[in-house]
């Protein structure tokens, strides 16, 4: 795909620029698929004295930046990511879509916005610093509700953990069809149909091979069933099956 080639080229250009200017450079915000693509394509292509990492402002962030810098240079994440705290009265029922829609409505491109984390009477938006003043001056309402915008440093924010429902299961093997069946609560045959029908993503990339290996920590997204993480492989049962814990994001 042309878009894939372009994002990989941008990543390589970012690495080259950071090396040439002896400074920290960033690309993003990237969605999980773009991140996985870049991680795969730059493997073995990063100069030995350079460090490339992916960070979205907090651990477990879904959207992230590729941040490149010389190894001797300390990481100053606040230079490339900032946090907007959006607060107001009676906004606890607003959701991710409400906030994103209002930001996009200001003409801000999605690539300039990281994770959006509603938290009761406030919402944290991870964003590029260049967008800070514009959003602060122009975002006065979410729908019909008045809001105010305050800048926060990354270190000030404690993002609540994403709620999950653990599923304990045993699977005949760690193939994608087996793990997907346990996660979705369907038969292995039905899971195979979902995989072959292009309804399953493994680590945010479409996977059509039922025999693809699933490793601890991998993310499985099943259209119509939700998103899951193979959080723990617990060993082999007496019957030769593999005991696992699968977390379902709720």
Image (cartoon, helix red, strand yellow):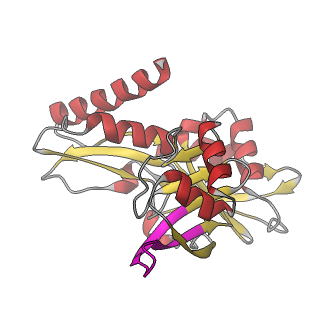
Q: Is 237 covered by the magenta stretch?
A: yes
* Residue 236 seen: yes
Question: Residue at (41%, 42%) from the top-left corner?
Answer: 36
The answer to whether 6 appears left or right of 40 in the picture is right
Q: Quadrant of residue 48?
A: top left
What is the residue that sits farthest to the top in this orientation? 2
Question: Residue at (62%, 55%) from the top-left corner?
Answer: 188
The answer to whether 219 appears left or right of 233 in the picture is right
Quadrant containing the C terminus is bottom right
The answer to whether 26 appears left or right of 102 in the picture is left
What is the residue that sits farthest to the bottom in this orientation? 238
Task: Look at the picture and state if 23 lies above or below 231.
Answer: above
Q: Quadrant of residue 137?
A: top right
Q: Is 238 covered by the magenta stretch?
A: yes
The answer to whether 243 appears left or right of 225 in the picture is left
Task: Look at the picture and state if 121 lies above or below 32.
Answer: below
Tell me the magenta residue range. 229-247
Question: Residue at (68%, 50%) from the top-left corner?
Answer: 190
Task: Look at the picture and state if 209 lies above or below 166.
Answer: above
Name the magenta segment's main secondary structure: strand
Question: Residue at (44%, 47%) from the top-left corner?
Answer: 212
* Residue 140 seen: no
Q: Position of residue 206 (x, y in %)?
A: 54, 38
Q: Position of residue 29 (x, y in %)?
A: 48, 42
Q: Position of residue 226 (x, y in %)?
A: 67, 56
Identify which residue, 79 or 14, lies in the foreground: 14
Identify which residue, 226 or 68, lies in the foreground: 226
Count how many numbered circles sit on residues in the image: 0
Identify which residue, 153 or 225, lies in the foreground: 225
What is the residue that sits farthest to the front in this orientation? 239
């Amino acid at each position: 795909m042309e878009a894939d080639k372009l994002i990989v080229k941008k990543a390589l250009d970012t690495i080259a620029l950071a090396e040439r200017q002896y400074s920290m450079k960033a690309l993003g915000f990237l969605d999980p698929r773009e991140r996985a693509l870049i991680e795969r394509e730059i493997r073995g292509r990063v100069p030995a004295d350079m460090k490339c990492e992916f960070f979205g402002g907090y651990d477990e962030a879904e959207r992230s930046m590729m941040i490149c810098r010389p190894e001797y240079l300390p990481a100053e994440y606040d230079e490339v990511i900032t946090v907007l705290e959006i607060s107001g009265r009676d906004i606890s029922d607003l959701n991710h879509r409400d906030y994103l829609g209002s930001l996009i409505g200001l003409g801000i491109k999605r690539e300039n916005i990281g994770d959006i984390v509603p938290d009761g009477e406030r919402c944290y938006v991870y964003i590029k610093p260049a967008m800070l003043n514009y959003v602060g001056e122009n975002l006065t309402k979410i729908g019909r509700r008045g809001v105010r915008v305050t800048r926060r440093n990354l270190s000030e924010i404690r993002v609540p953990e994403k709620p999950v429902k653990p599923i304990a299961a045993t699977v005949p093997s760690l193939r994608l069809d087996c793990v997907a069946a346990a996660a979705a609560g369907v038969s292995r045959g039905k899971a195979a149909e979902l995989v072959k029908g292009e309804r399953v993503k493994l680590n945010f990339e479409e996977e059509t091979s039922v025999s693809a290996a699933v490793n601890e920590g991998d993310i499985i997204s099943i259209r119509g069933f939700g998103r899951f993480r193979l959080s723990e492989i617990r060993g082999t049962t007496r019957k030769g099956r593999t005991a696992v814990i699968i977390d379902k994001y709720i």
